[in-house]
Image: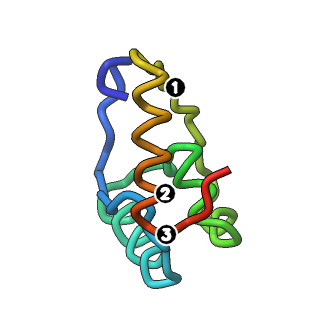
Amino acid sequence: MRKAGIEPAAEAAFPDHYAYTEKDVSDLHFLREQSGAAGFVTTEKDAVNLGAMLPALQPIAVIPVRMDLVDAARALDTILDTLARRGKPVP
């Protein structure tokens, strides 16, 4: 957002793959009220993680995230290795 010249009114950070709770949504509403923000912004990934709680954060802008793999073969090897170490079946 900052690269696009948009300065957020406030920020809240959550860990990767976070399982959002109703308390988190309540805390976000409190932060919005305190900061005077007009709404929320999140990534597509976190929108999925918010699941059924996403509508409770309206108005909300869901921003797509783009990733370019510099070495796709290495990335795939890393993913498959991680799955194997976790004991997950590898296709």
- What distance separates the C-alpha of mark 3 from that of mark 2? 6 Å
- CB under 8 Å between discs 1 and 3: no
Q: Earlier in the sequence, mark 1 or mark 2?
A: 1
The residue at which mark 1 appears reads as 66
**Residue type for callout 1:** Arg
> Which residue is more in the foreground, 48 or 1?
48
Label 1 to label 2: alpha-carbon separation: 23 Å
Where is residue 42? Give x, y as percent. Answer: 50, 47
Residue at the limit of the structure toward the bottom, as seen here: 23
85 lies left or right of 87: left
Position in image of residue 86 (x %, y %)? 44, 67
**Element type where label 2 sits in the image:** helix
Residues 85 and 1: in front is: 85
| Dot in front, 1 or 3 | 3
Where the N terminus falls, by quadrant? top left
The amino acid on which the numbered mark 3 sits, given as a three-letter code, is Gly
Query: What kind of element bears circle 1?
Result: loop
Residue type, label 2 = Leu
Mark 1 or mark 3: whose residue is earlier in sequence: 1
* x 55%, y 49%: residue: 45
Mark 3, residue position: 87
Q: Is residue 53 above or below residue 23?
A: above
Q: Which residue carries the number 2 mark?
A: 83
| Residue 58, placed above or below residue 28 | above
Q: For the residue carrying disc 2, how many other residues have a C-alpha within 10 Å: few (<14), some (14-19), or many (20+)? A: few
Q: Residues within 10 Å of mark 3 (few under 14, many from 20)?
A: few
